[in-house]
Amino acid sequence: MAEVTYDSATCIYPGADRPAVDALQLAIKDGEFVVMVGPSGCGKTTALRMLAGLEEIDDGAIRIDGRDMTGVPSRDRDIAMVFQNYALYPSKTVGENMGFALKMQGVAKDERARRVREAAKLLDLEALLDRKPRNLSGGQRQRVAMGRAIVREPKVFCMDEPLSNLDAQLRVQTRTQIAELQRRLAVTTVYVTHDQVEAMTMGERVAVMRAGQLQQFASPTELYDRPANVFVAGFIGSPQMNRFEATADRDGVRIGDALLPASDAQRQAIQGHSKLVAGIRPEHLSLGDGPLTMEVSLVEDLGSDSYVYGHLAGDDDSSMIVRSGRVHPRPGDVVKVAVDAEHLHLFDAASGLRVGD
């Protein structure tokens, strides 16, 4: 096990007009499961490859247990990598695939067999050790790839979107297995995904990336309840947070002609901010007597719940999502929407940064 530290770590690809990873600052605790998440091209995979020694660090440093990894070859970092592509040897059995890296390291045959059996038991692969990869399902192949990493008994697991090739149902099942396995092994794990639901359900802490820069590093609960900026507010949460152009008012916040009450702390904080972005999650809006007026364009009926999509009446460029339960309006209806003011998020429109509380 090991602590991992990104100390202003930077990676610049030749010919690029900006760093792929720009002065990344992260401190990952011993045994912690950290997820890096963000849209395509945000630098999350590059950051993982920097840790694994597959990309050079142009500035700053990455440390494992206090040791600077600059210039240290990948094979000497005591890291095991699990890729999106399973990359199994088709001619070898499951057991041979899992133990191959140990064989290359010169580990004795009895010790290899012991580690493979232990990993197979953890991953429920004992009955499959003699099969070839072509006789396995996608989920089983991914577990073999996990087993290949586990048998090495590394200090750090690096996982690069390992579930993206699986179907939706199997992805949910496998991510639960990976999270439970990591807790049992207590090995420091850095996991990369573009799926924010995956990030929120698996990570002890989540690093949200954008354009090579860290936006926020916090627990899933803190990311959801207190997003640091407009980008995090919109990226974290499904459906995403409603965001409206707003202005400060002596009594609260104005969205168009509607006045939303704000807390005393928020009213003080927004003074001096001429333009704001007001954020409200769909579950904190409700159909009924309220200050906002919505024109409905689409209803997603999910059985136990419904989401109503539309825009502010008179503002076709805006968008709004309301969680409405099982009773909902029809497309084309104009309805009133109430706001739970205790869950109002405010951001400065120019900087995008959170304002108040």
Image (spheres, grey):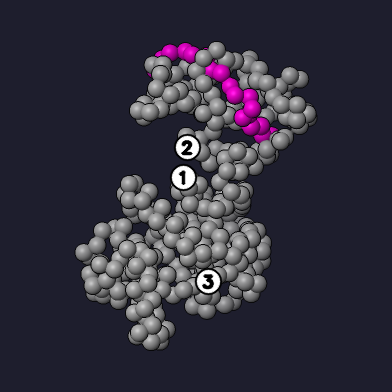
- Residue, x 52% and y 49% (percent of image)? 38
Marks 3, 2: nearer the viewer:
3
Mark 2 residue type = Ser
- Residue 238 — which label? 2
The percent coordinates of residue 77 (x first, y second) are: 54, 75
Cβ–Cβ below 8 Å for labels 3 and 1? no
- Secondary structure under badge 1? helix
- Secondary structure under badge 3? loop
- Residue, x 37% and y 72% (percent of image)? 118
Distance in Å between CA atoms under marks 3 and 2:
34 Å
Q: Can you identify the residue that label 1 sits on?
A: 197
Q: Which residues are magenta?
A: 331-350
**Quarter that holds the C terminus:** top right
Cβ–Cβ below 8 Å for labels 3 and 2? no
**Quarter that holds the N terminus:** bottom right
Say whether residue 335 is left or right of residue 87.
Answer: right
